[in-house]
Image: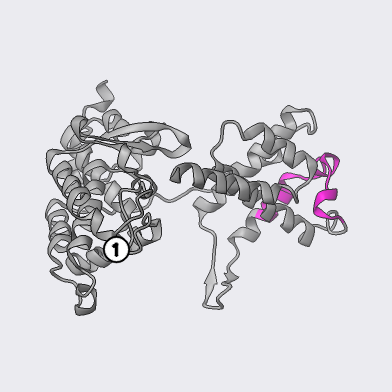
Amino acid sequence: MYKEDRENEARFRAEAINREMPRFVRSFFMSEENHLSGMTLYSYASQLKTFFDFLLENNPYFSKKGLKEITVEDMAKLTDEDIAEFLHDLRMPKERKSNKGLSVCSETTIMHYMVSLNRLFSYLTAHGYLSLNPVEMIKRGRVKKKEIIYLEKDEKQDLINTVSTGDGLTKNQLKFHDIKASKRDTAICTIFLDTGIRVSELVGMNLNDVNFSKHGINVHRKGGNFDTVYMSDNAEKILSDYIENGRGLYKPDRNETAVFLNRSGNRISVRSVEKLVKKYMYGCVPDKAEKITPHKLRTTFAETMLIKTGDVEKVQKLMGHSSISSTMHYVTSTEASIEAVRNLSQD
């Protein structure tokens, strides 16, 4: 239900934006909605809305038009220079809404805008509305490879120790570190490190998704795919202990199906999980705390499995990636990981 609710909400928000868009944009989205997730549709809608708002405010030809008045004939007048001007505007520093400094779009974000624009213009070209796609004439920027942050073996153990015992937490934090929080949070961090699931997948876990007899957890992957991840004996023991002896302490409603609960007995949120991971990291590995998120615990799992197996394709399956190129983002330049993949070129 949680996953379906999030999907429906994203589609609802995308549709709310698309109602204000030109007719051909709505047609484009109707052609895409059967094979894209709600979050992707919402992302495309938001980014295309930003693009059209820019045209209406900055392009002399479009400045006298309303958003819904834009036609495919108008789109045919756009050139690669118009697209480049929009991308330039994205790169320009802008004041934050909170008036606390300036914000800029990263090259990764700009690449996402280009993907959205390219799909729209490709649709218009394929349907004969345009003779060419101006986005294809834009040279794409180079996205710098980010430093891969993950926990070493001893740091993983330090994290679990801090979560289970409270060692390293402040006096104020210890007031809330009761037995139910200890059991819940130990299970959360262990599952991250043991299975590499995404935070959204963990938050979306329901009781009937856990199959202890098969040592597995059913998860709904990005894009709506269904998958099973498998727990180690240790993770299974910790999760079982939380469900049997910790979950009930949150006093959930009898109809609540979520595995992990907040203090009100409802499904825990992604934001709450992010905050609790950060809290424990400051208690055990403060020098990395600012950079460690639930996603970095997922990265830690990927690095661990890659070094142990040396099998990128196996790690791809474990991570739930549809493309091996996604998995390669987790390969570090450490000697250990280089050695782990040294034979892949011979396959």
Instruction: Look at the image and tell me in which quarter the N terminus lies.
Output: top left
Q: Residue at x 80, y 32 (%)?
A: 129
Note whether 201 is above or below 105 in the view shown. Answer: above
Q: Residue furthest right?
A: 64
- For residue 272, side relative to residue 31 (left or right): left
Q: Residue at x 39, y 56 (%)?
A: 270
Residue 240: image location, x then y, percent: 18, 45
Q: Residue at x 22, y 68 (%)?
A: 286
Highlighted range, magenta: 65-86
Which quadrant of the figure has residue 167? bottom left
Secondary structure predominantly adopted by residues drawn in magenta: helix
* Residue 80 shown in magenta: yes
State the scheme by which the image is colored: one colour
**Which residue corresponds to mark 1?**
276
* Residue 84 shown in magenta: yes
Residue 103: image location, x then y, percent: 53, 68
Note whether 196 is above or below 87 in the view shown. Answer: above
Q: Amino acid at mark 1?
A: Leu
Q: Which residue occupies the foreground of this view, 244 or 175?
A: 244
